[in-house]
Amino acid sequence: MTAATLLFLPPDDATPWRWWRVDGDAVVADGEGLPVAGEADVIAVAPADAVTLHWADLPARSPAQALAAARIVVGDATAVPAHELHVAIGPDRGESRAIAVVAADRMTGWLARLAADGIDPAAILPAPFLLPVPEDGYVRADLAGQPVVRGRTSGWADEARLTDLVTAGQVPATLARDDVRRAAAATLADLPLNLRQGPFARRSRRAIDWALVRRLAVLTGLILAVTLAIDVVRIARYSLGADTIEARADVVARQGLPRGAADGGDAARMLDDRLARLRGPGAGFSATAAAVYQVVQASPGSEVTALLFEPNGSMRVSLSAASEAEANATKARLESAGFTVVSSVFTAANGRLTGDLTVTP
């Protein structure tokens, strides 16, 4: 992080807001109140007296496991219910990891107040982390009006009795103003801990990747073009196949006509005409006669005495039957076979009935 604004959260309403402008490895400006909005990220600095820091060896298998272990460490060191605390952990660097504990309502209040002023901080950093890690003992510094003490695995707001108790009477070394600011700038290059984790994590604004959108549009167009090409090829193949089948049918139809008969006309139509002439009009003589004989054979007492095939496709059948019931049964069977049957008057002679049936398809 080469440029950022450190915004120090006041420990109480009576303390003014203060900020440091960091560029590269130096603090280039500072002031009171809220900073003027710029392109640099805002790093909010939580007051040392609002955050409790711990260090512990945490499992490195997954962030969830590390956070669960951190909550166990915190639960053993505080009497506050776990649901009222926000726990954040530092990155795994192969050594004891920093654990920060702050009241959840305090985090909510900070973020709400910053949001009301149009500020969405990229991170919230506990104040002690702005001080350098001492090689031995403790260091003390004033951070925008807030006295802070830090050890190798500790950090707290500087209060006389608390400091004496924690350091066991060892006096912390006081850092110079320039050393403090250089250390703060160096800290921003690799944040040791960010309180904006879990439910308080910063929501990233996803920008539209127009290059990706254009690539997807091109791919979609190519897919549609290929799909259309496949359909066109399939239609062309079907059309070519239909033309081939039609040509073969025409060749077969011409083979059924006398030589030279279909040279100047529609072979299929001429073949239909020839077939009609051969079989006769209507259903044709053969089909009608076959149906009549099949029905008469099913009536043992009936017999056909004469057949006459008319030019209009109807067939007049002279029938001799043993009884009127048998004649009616023959007529009914012909009608069931799909013919229209008109019966003449049957006359009795020599113990049999004779008459005509006109069978029309």
Image (spheres, rainbow, N blue to C red):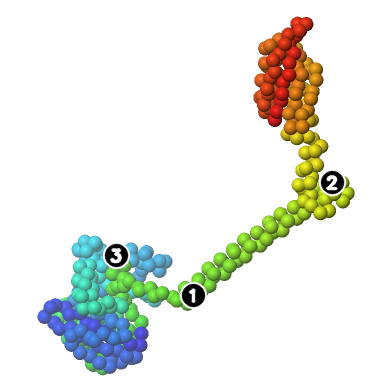
Towards the viewer: 67 or 255: 255
Q: Classify residue 120 by image quadrant.
A: bottom left
Front of the two marks 3 and 2: 2
* Left or right placement of residue 122 versus residue 215 in this view: left
Instruction: Say which label, 1 or 3, has the lower sequence index.
Output: 3
Disc 2 + disc 1, Cβ < 8 Å: no
- Residue under label 3: 71
* Quarter of the figure with residue 201: bottom left
Circle 2: residue type: Leu
Residue 30 figure quarter: bottom left
- Asked if one can make out residue 171 in the rendered structure from this viewpoint, the answer is no
Name the residue rendered at 58%, 67% in the picture.
225
Q: Nearest the camera: 259 or 252? A: 259
Residue 53 appears at what percent x and percent y? Answer: 26, 74
For the residues marked 3 and 2, what is the alpha-carbon distance in whole angstroms?
Answer: 99 Å
Label 3 or label 2, whichever comes before in sequence order = 3
Rendered image: mark on residue 257: 2
Instruction: Identify the mark nearer the N-term, 2 or 1.
Output: 1
**Extreme residue in the top direction:** 351
> Disc 2 versus disc 1: distance between alpha carbons?
65 Å
Q: Residue, x 75% and y 6% (percent of image)? A: 351
Three-letter code for the amino acid on which mark 3 is drawn: Arg
x and y, in percent, of residue 202 in the image: 31, 72
Pointer 1 residue: 214
Work out which residue is located at the far right of the displayed protein and give it: 259
The image shows a total of numbered marks equal to: 3
